Image (cartoon, rainbow, N blue to C red):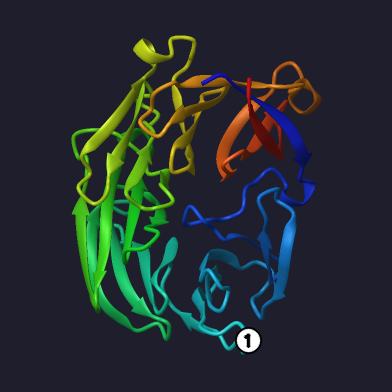
Amino acid sequence: MPMRAKLVRTVPELEGKLPLTRTPRGPRLTLKDGTLTTWDQDLQPLHRLPTSLPAAAKLLDARADLSALVAAVDRGLCIVADTRRPNAAVIAVAADSATFITPNRLVVTVPGAPAEGRSFSEFHRVLLMDLEGVVLDEQRIEADEASPYALVHPTDPAVLCDFIMGQDGNVLVVIRADGDALSVREVFPAEAFVNRGFSPGGTRVLLPPYPMDPGSAVVATWPEFAIAARLDVAEDLPEVQLGIDVWGGFLDDDHVLLLATEQAPIVATADLREAALVQLVDFAAVGGDEGFIEIAAPLAPDRFAGVVWNSGTRQTTVWRLERV
């Protein structure tokens, strides 16, 4: 599937970062100086909503209609249950992620206290919380010094969460809410994949490789997690030099975006056939001679965002895909 991409625009306001998004359909969100901003498929600001949150608050998630949000603040977890009347509940937990699993329930992850003689956490608490901060259920994930990354299923009350442990690998789990009860199930314990994106319909999930073994990516079925397709770069795309990076997602139900590390994006069909490196037209205008796309994420069937690294600086860019 020969493709090329042309630069649509650079986005200085995003300062070399991408907006937060938890589902294939968005919304795409940032929180800066207490103002919540939504972004369109060209990363143009759509709407700005002032909040009562402090300037240093870090956005963790928001409802799709922006009627509620959750953020990390110095004092703990800040839940704004109604952005029209922003009286925030501040919960004294050192949460490192919080995700709306249903409109009125949050999945919150909290690093466990280090054991005696240890300087790092060896597990995460996974909490089901209402919008008043009441803990309704709790589970535990064994993962050393981990950082969580969560994706919400488009239709099911479920979160696919990756607990990343650096050189020690990762733990990939499905977290489900059944009423006010949580269940946690590890998937692919014998393989190293990261969660990167559900298909728009939610029937499949794209899983690039963990960096320690970057040779192949897979598409798995939901909720069975049977491997439906695999892309092995050694056999299917030998021009990839350093392997597949952790970034990407579904462009639409029929196509996926991946990233060849320090090289170029990859576009393939949803069954990982016809994979090809994307030609970046006039890339030197933003990347110079030594730059590359460090992060890539779908924005629309014919659009993706790329964070370009060049000589120690990063800038956010938008590219339009075209068939060659």
Q: Please say whether residue 143 is visible from this viewpoint.
A: no
* SS state under label 1: loop
Residue at 67% over, 57% down: 39
How many numbered marks, from 0 up? 1
Residue type, mark 1 in image: Arg
Residue in the image at 61% along x and 38% along y: 302
State the image coordinates of residue 137 (x, y, percent, origin top left): 24, 75
* Up-down relation of residue 83 to residue 115 (above or below): below
Which quadrant would residue 254 be assigned to in this image? top left
State the residue in front, 168 or 159: 159
261 relative to 170, above or below: above
Q: Residue at x 62, y 48 (%)?
A: 18
Q: Position of residue 299 (x, y in %)?
A: 59, 46
Where is residue 300 drawn, in percent x and y?
59, 45
- Give the class, few, some or many, for how many residues have Cα within 10 Å of label 1's Cα (few <14, many ≥20): few
Q: Quadrant of residue 44?
A: bottom right
Q: Which residue is mark 1?
A: 84
Tell me if residue 257 comes above or below residue 253 in the rendering: above
Image quarter in which the C terminus is found? top right
Vertical side of 324 occupied by 218: above or below:
below
Q: Nearer the viewer, residue 318 or 110?
A: 318
Please give left or right for residue 30 compared with residue 203 in the image: right
Please state the horizontal and vertical placement of residue 182, each as a whole percent of the image.
23, 69
Left or right placement of residue 297 versus residue 44 in this view = left
Residue 279 vs residue 177: left or right? Answer: right
Q: Is residue 311 left or right of residue 233?
A: right
| Nearer to the camera, 57 or 69 | 69
Q: Residue at left 51%, top 21%?
A: 1
Q: Quadrant of residue 110?
A: bottom left
